[in-house]
Image (spheres, rainbow, N blue to C red):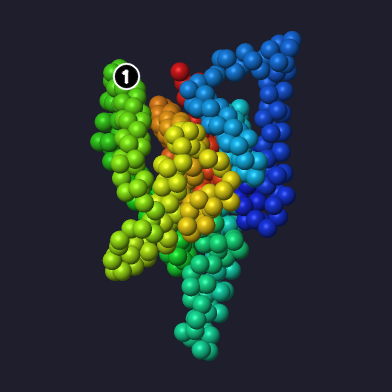
Amino acid sequence: MTLFLSAKQIVDLLYQFKFLDYIMVVAAAGLVVYKAVKEYRVSGEKGFAGYVLNTVKKNFCLTDALIMILAVLVGLSLLRNLDGFAEACAIESAFLVYLLGRVYGKEVLNAGKNLAYVGYGIIYVNGGYYLVKCIDYYSHEGYPFPHLGDLKNSGALYYYKTDLGIAILFATVFIYCFSKALIAKYITIFIVNVAFLFHTYARTSQAIYILFLTGICIIEISKYIKKSKINSHKKAENPNNNKKLKITITGCAVVSMVIILIGMVLLHVSPVKKKPYSDLVISDDVAEKIEDIFHSRQIIWWDTFHFMMNYSPVTELIGVDIDKDSFALHNSEQMMSHCMYLTIIFGLGFVGFIVFICLMWTVFYKLLSLDRSERTMKLLLFSSFVIFLIMGLTTDAFEYTQISWFPFIFAGMAVSEAKINE
């Protein structure tokens, strides 16, 4: 398990060798089977199938059910268009590693030290490479010369700036959670990463990193405030606390569903249904400002909803399909969505989107229900899903295994631990 998790960061760096991704999927499935067989032998039960069935019955929870529903919806979407096979495999692999986290539980944390070491390597190897490129650029005889944008968009040893930004974010999480070398940790997080990441155009990653820095500062300061510890202790002793938490989470889930349903109604009565983006009357100045912010994404999103609202009610409910080429055919820019949430709506419909939202609620409920002593687990789960959900605003994060795998592994681990605590 330790080798598997450590290898994931390296495989993401070696993106050119696609076969490594397939090996990782096979390895994940193999680790699940290995753990199941090992536990079966220890249990002393006679039938392996009966042991698996009993284990599932004993540990099954709402989060597992939502994962299964999404897996089925992705499978049905694939049946509608087999060209979406690659996208379906990427999404289903996230569910597989969730199962891996469920099976191994807290053992996932044993890989922490190695994750931090690999994180240091990722940052400094890529940082060194990027520094060489910067020196070459700024010391050039004809400086300033064209193609600064190429430098800013460079992913160093990664394919693109987005991939680099994601790698830095996850490496930062692992270093902060597991590294014991305090000087190296804080120099890397507060100096090296800031200089490195903020020299690129990876704006979404920069925004997330600012959130991380703010969170780290708050955590470090809170360690020295005894009053906050006393207050948290009193809250833990309050018998009504858990009941209030459950009511709050349930209420939020219901409210989110209502908001989604209201959103569907508003889409039907809005200009999105009535006309494509090209028919809108927008002044040149406003259009230029919108384009600077969204880089044509607004056209993609508008045209996609316009198509879905005018095609059929079935399309709205269960989606079209998850093939990227199919998505590109239904917007005037002929591009991918660059938004995980829109990809889910297009591929799985509003039914799939509601299931996804409920899944996220249950994951964060498990986060809140974890014991106070599980600080590292909470940090891993929360920070990884912050990366997943915010990057999902501008990327197809569900189909992006570099983004989706770690959050779902940690989600599986947290769900198993919360189940034990029950």
Q: Secondary structure at mark 1?
A: helix
Query: How many marks are shown on the rendered structure?
Result: 1
* Relative height, residue 102 to residue 204 (above, below): above
> Quarter-wise, where is residue 227 in the image?
top left
Residue 349 seen in the figure: no
| x and y percentages locating residue 178 in the rendered image | 51, 44
- How far across and how far down the image is residue 28, in percent? 67, 36
**Quick check: 186 above or below 342?**
below
- For the point 43% across and 52% down, the residue is 303
Residue 70 shows up from this direction: yes
* Nearer to us in this view, 396 or 209: 396
Which residue sits at x=41%, y=56%? 299
Please give left or right for residue 351 compared with residue 56 in the image: left
At x 43% / y 39%, what residue is drawn? 382
Q: Residues within 10 Å of mark 1 (few under 14, many from 20)?
A: few
Residue sticking out furthest to the bottom:
141
Which quadrant of the figure has residue 350? Answer: top left
What amino acid is found at the position of numbered circle 1 in the picture? Lys
Where residue 89 sits in the image (x, y, percent)? Answer: 64, 40
Pick the quarter of the image with the C terminus: top left
* Position of residue 367 in the picture relative to residue 330 (left or right): left
Q: Residue at x 66, y 17 (%)?
A: 52
- In this picture, residue 303 sits left or right of residue 179: left
The quarter of the image holding the N terminus is: top right
Q: Is residue 266 above or below residue 9?
A: above
Residue at mark 1: 243
